[in-house]
Structures are given as structure tokens and as C-alpha cells.
Amino acid sequence: MIGNEKRAILLLGHGSRASDANEAMYRVAQDLKEQEVYSIIECAFLEMSSPDIATGLTTCKAQGAATILIIPYFLHLGMHVQRDLPQIIGQWHEANPEVAVKQGNHLGYSPLLTQLVQQRIDEAIS
């Protein structure tokens, strides 16, 4: 709980038919939970995996979230991030106006990503 309102973090991934493909996002969610900053941290998916976005939002609401902070776990600013996610989130919010919904930026560029790519290069060389 931060301030007087209960906030939830909802990580949104693309989803995949491959059973282990979503594991990295779940591990990030677990790492965030262990920091004990937010009491509600959930994952949801655009397609091919469960729960879907509306279910993820509803799960956060059911746990008492007054505000849901959505973080798209997408590397690139493609049509899913620009069009699909805002449309789905907007439809859910229209039906649930009592819950504040804020969407953060997708992962995109970060110097931390450059460091990770360099680490992967080093791993490949050795």
C-alpha cells in the first residue's frame, strides 16, 4: 500500500503457445513481489496465454486495487503496444470506472538493455 490507496502492478506480455515462453515475465513479477513495495503484482497476456488482460485487471480489482499500473512487457513499440493494449484496457476501464488505470511505457531502449546484450555477447564468445 502506498499512501492511502492500494496499487496493483499488472505486467502485460504477448503470450505464447510454448509452455515456458512466459516464464521470464513471471520471474520478474516474483522479483517485484519480493521487494514488498506493492501488495498486488499480477501478469496477463494479450493472446495465446492465460489470463487475458481483462481477467488480469479484474483480478487486481478483486484484490482491492484502487489503481492499476500497467507495464507492457514488450520490447518494441509495435501495433500491440500502440493500438491493441490501449483498446483492451480502455474497454475494461469503461466498465470499471471506479478503478484508476495507468499505463506505463513498454520496455523499449535502456542502457541496461545494452548491458544485457553485451553480457549475452560475452556468454556466446566464451
Image (cartoon, rainbow, N blue to C red):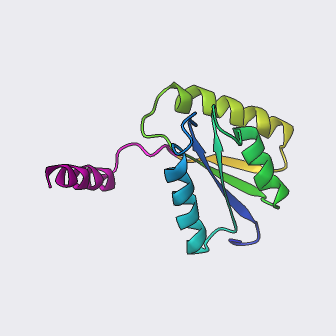
Q: Nearer the viewer, residue 45 or 20?
A: 20
Magenta-highlighted residues: 105-126
Q: Nearer the viewer, residue 4 or 86?
A: 86
Answer with left or right where residue 40 lies relative to residue 111.
right
- Tally of marks: 0
Q: Position of residue 1 (x, y in %)?
A: 71, 71
Say whether residue 110 is magenta: yes
Answer with left or right where residue 120 lies relative to residue 108.
left
Residue at image x 61%, y 28%?
Answer: 84
Residue at image x 32%, y 51%?
Answer: 113
In which quadrant of the rendered view does residue 46 lie? top right
Q: Position of residue 92 (x, y in %)?
A: 78, 37
In which quadrant of the rendered view does residue 85 lie? top right
Q: Position of residue 64 (x, y in %)?
A: 82, 61
Viewport quadrant of the C terminus: bottom left
Q: Residue furthest left?
A: 125
User: What predominant SS class does the magenta segment belong to?
Assistant: helix
Q: Position of residue 56 (x, y in %)?
A: 73, 46
Residue at image x 57%, y 59%?
Answer: 29
